[in-house]
Amino acid sequence: MKTKQILAILMFVSLLSFASLSRADDIVATGSGNWSSTNADAPWPGGIVPGTNDDADIEAPFNVTVDSTASVQYIYGGGTVTMTPGSTLNVVGDPAGANGTYQLTNLDTSAPGNTVIYSGNPFWAKHQDYYNLVFSNTVTTNMIDFYNGLVNSQDPSMPMTIAGDFTVIGKIKVQQGDDITIMGNLTLSTNAQWDCSLTNLIVMGNTTLGANALLLDLDGADGTNYFGGSVTVSSNALGWNVSDVITWDIGGSLTNNGTIVGKGYGSISFDGTGNITGSKPIKIPTMTVNGTYTIGTTITLITNTPTLNGTLVFDLANTNEIVLLTNAGTALYYSGNLNVINSGVAPVAGNSYKLFNAPSYGGAFASTNLPMLAPNLIWVDNTLVNGSFAVASTGPTTPPTLFVSRNGGLLTLSWDSTNFPGYSVQALTNSAGIIGTNWGATGSGTNSPFGVAINPSGPPVFFRLSKP
């Protein structure tokens, strides 16, 4: 976010803050205790628990503990709010959309399984560690920013660690100013955006882009974007834009049912074990494979040859291609390992499987593993010619079997001409039996099946298969 934009937002939300302070019912804690307590002495005066339309002032040395589920407009003061395991705190913001928890000195969210939900303006979410964090907003007009940068002296930028999951719902754009590490899952749901600019985003769990969600990085030269789990782009997501980024790193699988685009030097590095799959193809500047990945969809590379340090896996039952466009101005260079498997029907002679598509090819795989073939079949490596493998016959070690059937006056001879190419039918006419060497060609008897008209009054005719 540009400096001028930050200042403009700060001026606007500051006015909202002053305008809204008089609208909330201000409840001042008079002691320490559980948030839901109706004790007349503590923590709330008269035992009135703050609700959705109230704000809470908690001053030191008081510690108010959220012990189940609580909702409040906003919280401020020099005291402490402590989340218990599994508890939920919903901060809805004031009617003007300002305020949250940033003016509270201590928000202890270290207990396992607790969740803090900001259903108002996430701009006022406190910059700190959380267990589970949710931004949920029903705004339908302009995008609202959560900026983990310097907002004011009460809410400076700081590295944030989310011990569990981070979920963003609504027209909310998370724009970083400092590192964010998510130990669980990241979900960008309806209308959410995440701009990873400036610093480091690390997601150890899975990442999901839902309806109208967008993931991008407008300053990828600075910082690192790492997804330790799998990334799923749904069919109705705005998608994943890998432009202007040196590398996005993935440790799990990538499933693309929507849109993945990129230009410039944007690259995805696949560093773990998994599948690159989905109902939609992928078109990005280039890619790196450091782990072991099965290619389950077409991947088109726009600007540069892929870096293949790991293992590529292709399944003959669902052949997909890695395509390098001509305008990249380079050959597709092989390296790493290639493992071809087959979960479908067995290959036969004449089959060809195209795995790579480029204007030219170079390099070599360190190792190539191909499926076993039936006897007398071999693989022909054409990867340096046209990016494919073909199946050819070496010729049988035993002759084919000639089958005979009769239908009225027609005798039909047939054999396996696919696995035994080059054989033809020869005939010998001799009343004395199969003697002599006067076998002759039968004209069209080079193709199976071969039909012969029966002449009952003629001399005996014998047939055999012969290969020159």
Image (tube, rainbow, N blue to C red):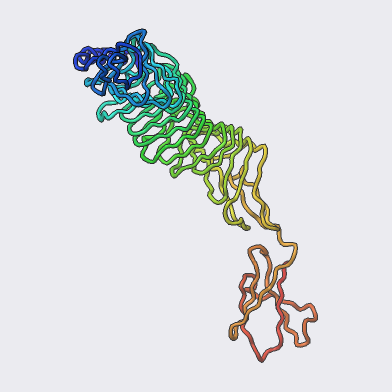
- Do we see residue 133 in this rendering? yes
Q: Residue 81 in the image: x percent, y percent?
A: 37, 16
Name the residue at 39% across, 29% down.
167
The residue closer to the viewer here, 177 or 131, is 131
Q: Residue 226 in the image: x percent, y percent?
A: 50, 26
Position of 120 with respect to 269 (left or right) is left
Name the residue at 47% across, 28% down.
184
- Do we see residue 7 in this rendering? no
Please determine whether, in this image, residue 213 is positioned above or below residue 257: above
Name the residue at 56% across, 41% down.
294
The residue closer to the viewer here, 238 or 123, is 123
State the count of labels.
0
Position of 256 with respect to 51 (left or right) is right
Residue 97 lies in quadrant:
top left
Q: Residue 278 in the image: x percent, y percent?
A: 46, 43
Q: In which quarter of the image is the N terminus?
A: top left
Residue 410 lies in quadrant:
bottom right
Q: Residue 35 in the image: x percent, y percent?
A: 33, 20
The residue closer to the viewer here, 407 or 331, is 407
Q: Quadrant of the C terminus?
A: bottom right
The residue closer to the viewer here, 166 or 148, is 166
Name the residue at 45% across, 18% down.
179
- Residue positioned most to the right: 436
